[in-house]
């Protein structure tokens, strides 16, 4: 009897192709996206930190330069009396001071090339929503306070100014106090307090300048370090 054909078939082993499944690809792409996002956030944070550091360094540099310049210019003040006084209510000095403007006679530091005594004016100039701190100066040709500053040299000390005020003090008094305007007919103040704020830099540290007399310009100056004497 003849045997029937065998139903045996060789078993073929299926092998994996070595690729990725769709799920694995999606997981990998998700992880890569998260990694790129994290790197982008880190780079953005680093850039913002560097920008803030640069702004702080620029602000500190502006503060240092402006403070040093004002110390050198405001620190030497003439107590010379002015001509043309017509009223006892007028100040006898070549000096005018209130909370927004200071006019005085002094000398420019030698490195700035303005020799001789100068009239100075420290004030704020407004333009739209921002302002600027200006220093104007011109030669003192005669002992009369200038009525017009159009011909003066103008230097911008601080830009984007949002607040500016001045206060004055006579440290020779028993109880010296800061005043928004100087009205004394006997002497000029010993100290001035400059308060500033800018749009990007915020409020600056208060700047206190000791106003020392130019020797020989003022009867109170002989043997004294500041107008008003020592405490």
Image (spheres, helix red, strand yellow):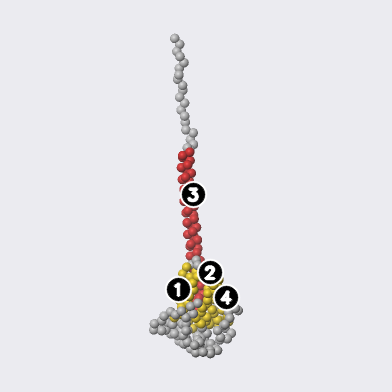
Identify the secondary structure beneath mark 2: loop
User: In the rendered structure, which disc, 3 or 4, sits on the residue that comes first in sequence?
Assistant: 3
Between marks 2 and 3 in the image, the one whose residue lies nearer the viewer: 2
Please name the residue that numbered disc 4 is placed on. 154
Q: Residue at x 48, y 75 (%)?
A: 165
Image coords of residue 47 (percent x, y):
50, 57
- Pick whichever, 194 or 87, lies toward us: 87
The image's mark for residue 129 is 2
Dot 1: few (<14), some (14–19), or many (≥20) neighbours within 10 Å?
few
Image coords of residue 36 (percent x, y):
49, 49
User: In the rendered structure, which disc, 4 or 1, sits on the residue that comes first in sequence?
Assistant: 4
User: In the rendered structure, which disc, 2 or 1, sits on the residue that comes first in sequence?
Assistant: 2
Cα distance in 3D space between marks 4 and 2: 21 Å
Cα distance in 3D space between marks 2 and 3: 42 Å
Q: Quadrant of the N terminus?
A: top left
Image coords of residue 68 (percent x, y):
50, 74
Tag 4–tag 2 contact (CB < 8 Å):
no
Tag 2–tag 1 contact (CB < 8 Å):
no
User: In the rendered structure, which disc, 3 or 1, sits on the residue that comes first in sequence?
Assistant: 3
Identify the secondary structure beneath mark 4: strand
The image's mark for residue 136 is none
User: In the rendered structure, which disc, 4 or 2, sits on the residue that comes first in sequence?
Assistant: 2
| Residue 63 at least partly seen | no
Please name the residue that numbered disc 1 is placed on. 206
Cα distance in 3D space between marks 2 and 1: 23 Å
Please name the residue that numbered disc 3 is placed on. 36
User: In the rendered structure, which disc, 2 or 3, sits on the residue that comes first in sequence?
Assistant: 3
Q: Is residue 144 above or below residue 5?
A: below
Q: Residue at x 47, y 87 (%)?
A: 185
């Amino acid at each position: 009897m003849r045997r029937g054909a065998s139903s045996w078939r060789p078993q073929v082993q299926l092998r994996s192709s070595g690729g990725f499944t769709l799920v694995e690809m999606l997981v990998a792409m998700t992880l890569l996206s998260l990694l790129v996002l994290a790197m982008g956030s880190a780079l953005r944070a680093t850039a913002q930190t560097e920008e803030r550091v640069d702004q702080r360094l620029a602000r500190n540099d502006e503060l240092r330069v402006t403070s040093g310049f004002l110390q050198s210019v405001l620190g030497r003040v003439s107590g010379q009396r002015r001509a043309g006084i017509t009223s006892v209510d007028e100040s006898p000095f070549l000096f005018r001071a209130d909370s927004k403007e200071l006019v005085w006679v002094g000398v420019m530091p030698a490195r700035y090339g303005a020799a001789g005594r100068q009239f100075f004016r420290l004030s704020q100039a407004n333009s739209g929503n921002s302002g600027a701190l200006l220093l104007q100066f011109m030669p003192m040709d005669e002992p009369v306070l200038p009525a017009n500053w159009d011909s003066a040299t103008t230097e911008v000390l601080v830009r984007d100014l949002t607040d500016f005020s001045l206060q004055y003090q006579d440290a020779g008094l028993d109880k010296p106090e800061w005043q928004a305007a100087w009205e004394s007919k006997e002497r000029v103040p010993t100290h001035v307090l400059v308060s500033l704020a800018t749009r990007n830099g915020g409020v600056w540290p208060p700047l206190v300048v000791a106003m020392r007399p130019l020797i020989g310009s003022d009867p109170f100056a002989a043997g004294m370090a500041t107008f008003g004497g020592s405490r």
